[in-house]
Amino acid sequence: MARRKGLTFYQKKKKLNITLVKEIGSWIFWIMVSIGLGALTVFCIGMKTSVIGSAMEPCLYNGQEIFLNRMIYKATSPKIGDVIVFLPNGNEKSHYYVKRVVGGPGDKLYIKKGVLYVNDEIVDKYFNDKIAEAGLLENEVLLEDDEYFVIGDNCNSSEDSRSANIGTVKKGYIIGKVWFKMACGDSDIGFVK
């Protein structure tokens, strides 16, 4: 019988390409591993919380979500300029406070004419204005081995180490270092400096 020329409705059976299946399987495996490691990192090392109040404006805003590294201070100590999250006096019933470290162990701090001095050097690059209330820094404060002094960037709207009910922050009360911020209103998203 002669074959008809023209359209045929017979299809060839396609053979499964084993190499392609292995490649796709490999990609799916590594994507799942990456997602798993990311989730493990966030849940074990990192932590997400929100900023309460305007004390850290313009760096961080009220309600803005931030991510912290909870493990970094197990290996190192907070440094001047770090933005940290802590519980005041270790009070676990309090909300998390977010402030900037301006003094560490062995530092001498005081405020004179609205200007912060750390070891007799002016520190003003973090603050919006002159400091209206010196609080505990009206007199010179010498920090002990395990103490840190913190102030909000919006220093005149901040309850921080200058206040007697907060005072200096012991390393054990620090939850972690803020390293990333999410967008909030007109604010940007990115790493915290």
Image (cartoon, rainbow, N blue to C red):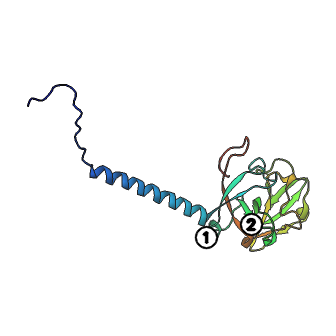
Residue under numbered circle 1: 75
Q: Secondary structure at mark 2?
A: loop
In the image, residue 52 sits, relative to residue 72, either above or below, namely above
Amino acid of disc 2 = Gly
Q: Nearer the viewer, mark 1 or mark 2?
A: 1
The residue under the point 24% across, 33% down is 9
Report the Cα–Cα distance between label 1 and label 2. Answer: 16 Å
Give above or below for 113 relative to 161.
Answer: above
Is 86 situated left or right of 28 in this image? right
Residue 105 shows in this picture: no
- List x then y, in percent, for residue 14: 25, 44
* In-front residue for pair 166/184: 184
Query: Closer to the N terminus: mark 1 or mark 2?
Result: 1
The image quarter containing residue 8 is top left
Image location (x, y in percent) of residue 133: 91, 56
Which residue has dot 2 on it?
104
